[in-house]
Image (tube, coloured by chain):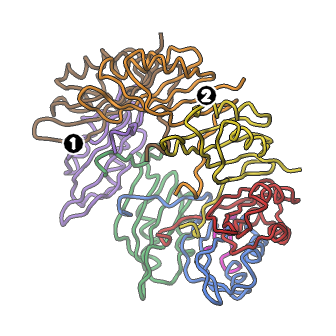
Chain colours: A red, B blue, C yellow, D green, E orange, F purple, G brown
């Protein structure tokens, strides 16, 4: 079985609990080494954040469970990396 | 015989199964070390993604088979690397 | 328990005490290795600064306490990193 | 005798055989370590690709022979590197 | 006690003594390892320069004393780094 | 005696011999380690190329001799590096 | 005594002697390790060049003497680095 190494997620969440709580909860999951959460936009009751999770063996359902557990929702999966090592997106002339 | 080391593919796929399933299936192929899938655009029933596959000995037909197996199609091959080591595209004044 | 590794904060503070005092006070907190404070904008009585704090085990409440202790306030949390190692935000085509 | 280390070529080729075949054939040449082929533009019957070939001792006539052997043609030589090691193009204020 | 590691200062100074004298005098201070001075703008009698000072234990009052000693003035403190190691400013989507 | 380490030259040359011949001839000179030639612009009978030559002890007259020997001419010297090691051009606020 | 490590100078010089002569003469000075000279602009009788000099112990008066000795003049000092090690200019939000 191959393994998930990185997930980049576009997430909508309530203002509370704040981003530190979300990051700490995701970092507690088995198979997760580190979590980065950046603020994209704040609205009246919700905020839009980008979540990057990396580790040797991520479980997408568990990640989703933590996000939904704090009242958030995944708007889109923006990047997935799987395999024995992390492969970065390669830019080509077709991206211009 | 020389070997394929990297493929960058412009792919159209149905919304289900999601990008994590595609990345995991490609990463299970023999000769593949890592897979990166990024979202380009979402339409009503399909999504356009860019797939980067790297490994010591990629089999293009097998990669194509996995993509078609989940109901997807390769729109274009955007980059191919072959040989004993990965050579990056070199920018020249002719690219400006 | 997972740990906070980096906080990036948008802070409003009075002109006195100056940025060197704020940086030194934050750097004295337990679990903090280094602090970066940059000036964003100066108004008549206050200045807007961006604070980046890194360390093996940050305590958000203590960081907040130091900022409020010099008469400042956190406008927004712009980035949080948690886990065993620092993960950087990954740019994807969805950011363009 | 000095040696060719890198060639960057602007190539027009028929749609078939595809870019993977061109890259694999070039990578089989003696003195070639790696080959990168990126898609620039697709027309009705042909496609324009950029080919980067690197190795300790490239033979330009053989590279040209492979490209013509699949029905392609070199439009222009965009970069040549020769000598004991690869020297990159240096940007100067005259390039702006 | 935590320590100052880097100061970036916006400085107005008379044309004489020149930038080499200012840089050498700052580099002589205890706790300073290196000094970078770049020219921003020249007016009739004064010039605006940006001063970057780095070292294991900077003393802001001494740095200020040297600048005022040559007839200059600090317009603003643009960056301060404190702690056991240098932390760089982190860019987030809120900076765009 | 100090030594030339890098020359960047703006060169006009006839279409024949091609850029591979020019690069190989320059790389054969004593004191040259590597040569990079990029295409800038093609006219009816001539092409404008940028030549970067690096090595521990370049002889400018010999480099000029090779270029004139294939019917080319140096339009301008765009960069010269001399000394015990290569120093890169440093960008300052005065370049903006 | 602290030491000068880098000078970046905006220089006006006659067309002859050319940039290679200026670079070689500066590289011969004691305390100089390497010299970079780039062409900025050519006028009828003079050319404007940017000179970057690096070494463990530069003597500004000697550097100035070489430039004036070939009929040139320093228009401005654009960057000075002094101390035990080279410190680079740090960009902050105030530079935007």
Q: Nearer the viewer, residue A66 or G63?
A: A66
Can residue G69 be seen in the rendering of this structure?
yes
Observer-side mark, 1 or 2, equals 2
Across and down, in percent, residue G3 comes to 45, 16
Image quarter of residue F52: top left
Spatial separation of the CA atoms under disc 1 and disc 2: 39 Å
Q: Over which residues does the magenta segment extend?
A: B50-62
Across and down, in percent, residue F91 comes to 39, 39
Q: Which mark is residue C17?
A: none
What's the residue at 34%, 19% (across, down)?
G28
Q: Nearer the viewer, residue D64 or G2?
A: G2
Q: Which mark is residue E5?
A: 2
Residue that extends furthest to the left in the rendered view of this protein? G44
- Residue B51: within the magenta? yes
Across and down, in percent, residue C54 comes to 71, 41
Number of dots carrying numbers: 2
Image quarter of residue A72: bottom right
Across and down, in percent, residue A87 comes to 67, 61
What residue sits right under mark 1 in the picture?
Answer: G41
Q: Tell me if residue D52 comes above or below residue B27 in the rendering.
A: above
Q: Does the CB distance between marks 1 and 2 fall below 8 Å?
A: no
What's the residue at 42%, 23% (across, down)?
G33
* Main SS category, magenta section: strand
């Amino acid at each position: 079985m191959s393994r998930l190494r990185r997930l980049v997620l576009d997430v909508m969440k309530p203002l509370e609990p704040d981003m530190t709580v979300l990051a700490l909860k995701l970092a507690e999951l088995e198979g997760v080494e580190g979590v980065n959460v950046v603020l994209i936009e704040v609205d009246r009751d919700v905020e839009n954040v980008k979540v990057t999770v990396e580790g040797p063996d991520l479980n997408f359902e568990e990640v989703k469970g933590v996000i939904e557990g704090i009242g958030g929702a995944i708007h889109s999966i923006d990047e997935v990396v799987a395999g024995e090592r992390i492969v970065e997106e390669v830019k080509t002339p077709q991206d211009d």
